[in-house]
Image: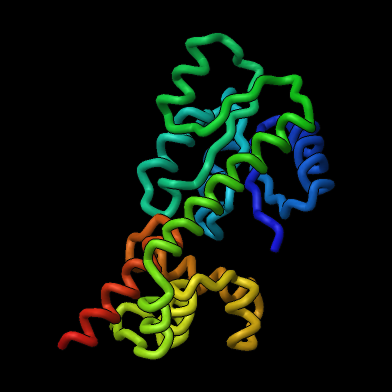
Amino acid sequence: MSKRLLVVDDEPNLLIAVGACLRAEGFDVVTARGGAEALVRVAEMVPDLIVSDVRMPGMDGYQLARQLRTSPRTALTPVVFLTAKDETSDRVEGFRAGVDAYLTKPFEPDELVAVIRGILDRVQRTHAEIARLVGSTQADAAQHAPFYDEALTEAEVRVAGSVARGLSNKEIAAEFGISVRTVENHISHILAKKGFGNRVEIARYVLDRTQSGEKS
């Protein structure tokens, strides 16, 4: 399944150019014309990665990055700055705000794509390693011994259990005969209800609850 990216820039032409560049590489791209609009998009869905300008009216890139880092839903979402601010002090402030990479305009499409793919690959390897450490035995337990949580709907509990088993959104959709978008909505609701920041935290929670239920 293609990764979903959020591109944030107040310049329409640049927004179109970056979006076209990334869509050509197979990414699912959503755009926003500023920091405030970006937060609205993030409230609708948590992207796999965010590409943002720094100089924007209202909420600038630094403010956006800091707000993303304070929210459990987006604390670990990768952020790449793409900006004309190329002073060392600008870069330092960007990294202090929590960005993962800092590129300057005019940008090289190949470099931007390479940086994005590198970050996403690292995130995927990290999640895979955590899933491996959790162990297949515990994951099987989560599948066969559903946990109970009054804050979650029955459908959300089933989806959470599948996340704990290491299934992708596409695999979960196929398993339950629902759309990928529906799976994404369930996961977003779980993250919001439980205050989690990513799928790994969902998996850990499910496994902990399952093990507690087996012991009781």
Residue 76's spot in the image, x, y percent?
44, 47
Residue located 30% across and 85% down the image: 148
The relative height of residue 121 versus residue 198 in the rendered view (above or below) is above
The residue lying at 77 percent from left, 43 percent from top is: 22
Indicate the quadrant containing the C terminus: top left, top right, bottom left or bottom right: bottom left
Q: Nearer the viewer, residue 8 or 48?
A: 48
Q: Height in image: 76 above or below 206?
A: above
Query: Foreground: 207 or 33?
Result: 207
Residue 162 percent across, percent down from the top left: 48, 78
Is residue 71 toward the left or the right of residue 178 in the image?
left
Where residue 184 sits, quadrant-wise, is bottom right
Decide which of 166, 76 is in the foreground and name it.
166
Q: Quadrant of residue 134?
A: bottom left
x 32%, y 84%: residue? 147
Report the quarter where the N terminus lies.
bottom right
Point out residue 70 in the picture as x, y percentages from the top left corner. 35, 43
Which residue does the image show at 62% across and 37% down from the upper left? 51
Residue 194 versus residue 46 in the image, above or below: below
Residue 111 lies in what quarter of the image?
A: top right
